[in-house]
């Protein structure tokens, strides 16, 4: 039986697979939009819509959502990093750190 508690390679392989899937989804969505821009319109379908236009709209919506999520993630990372840096700067001025943390030798 395979134990999944200490499988670093499994975590790494899963992360790589998810990154590859994400990048391929973005790439194929963009390719779908670029290749379908000059399609011939066939609006004589039963519901009056064009299948190619619907696919292009879905791919565009997917890319907009991915870009918005990426922008929010980058902004959140920046805010957290700024907050941590601010705490790091105030740690030394407000004496939250111990002498051991500051690597000060104590005289006996």
Image (tube, rainbow, N blue to C red):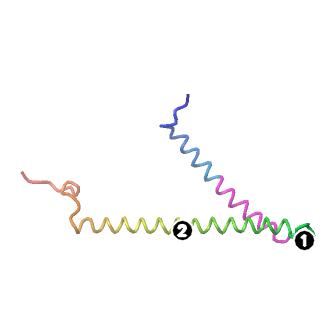
In the image, residue 47 sits, relative to residue 107, either above or below, namely below
Would you identify the image quadrant in which residue 54 lies? bottom right
Q: Real-space Cα distance between discs 1 and 2?
A: 37 Å
Q: Position of residue 85 (x, y in %)?
A: 36, 66
Q: Position of residue 19 (x, y in %)?
A: 61, 53
In the image, residue 21 sits, relative to residue 86, either above or below, namely above
Left or right of residue 87, residue 34 in this image: right
Q: Secondary structure at mark 2?
A: helix
Left or right of residue 40, residue 103 in this image: left
Would you identify the image quadrant in which residue 84 lies? bottom left
Q: Secondary structure at mark 1?
A: loop
Q: Nearer the viewer, mark 1 or mark 2?
A: 1
Instruction: Give the magenta range.
Output: 21-38
Which residue is under mark 2? 72
Quadrant where the N terminus sits is top right
Res. 7 mark: none
Would you identify the image quadrant in which residue 98 lies? bottom left
Label 1: few (<14), some (14–19) or many (≥20) C-alpha neighbours in 10 Å = few
Q: Position of residue 11 (x, y in %)?
A: 54, 44
Kindly check if marks 1 and 2 are in contact, taking CB atoms under 8 A apart as contact. no
Q: Earlier in the sequence, mark 1 or mark 2?
A: 1
Residue positioned 32% across, 66% down in the render: 87
Left or right of residue 22, residue 55 in this image: right
Q: Is residue 70 magenta?
A: no
Q: Nearer the viewer, residue 27 or 68?
A: 68
Q: Position of residue 106 (x, y in %)?
A: 12, 54
Residue positioned 73% across, 62% down in the render: 29
Which residue is under mark 1? 43
């Amino acid at each position: 039986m395979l134990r999944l508690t200490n499988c670093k390679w499994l975590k790494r392989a899963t992360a790589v697979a998810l990154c590859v899937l994400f990048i391929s989804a973005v790439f194929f969505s963009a390719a779908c939009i670029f290749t379908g821009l000059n399609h011939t319109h066939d609006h004589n379908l039963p519901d009056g819509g064009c299948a190619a236009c619907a696919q292009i709209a879905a791919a565009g919506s997917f890319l907009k959502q991915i870009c918005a999520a990426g922008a929010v993630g980058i902004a959140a990372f920046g805010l957290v990093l700024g907050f941590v840096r601010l705490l790091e700067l105030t740690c030394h001025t407000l004496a939250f750190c111990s002498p051991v943390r500051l690597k000060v030798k104590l005289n006996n």
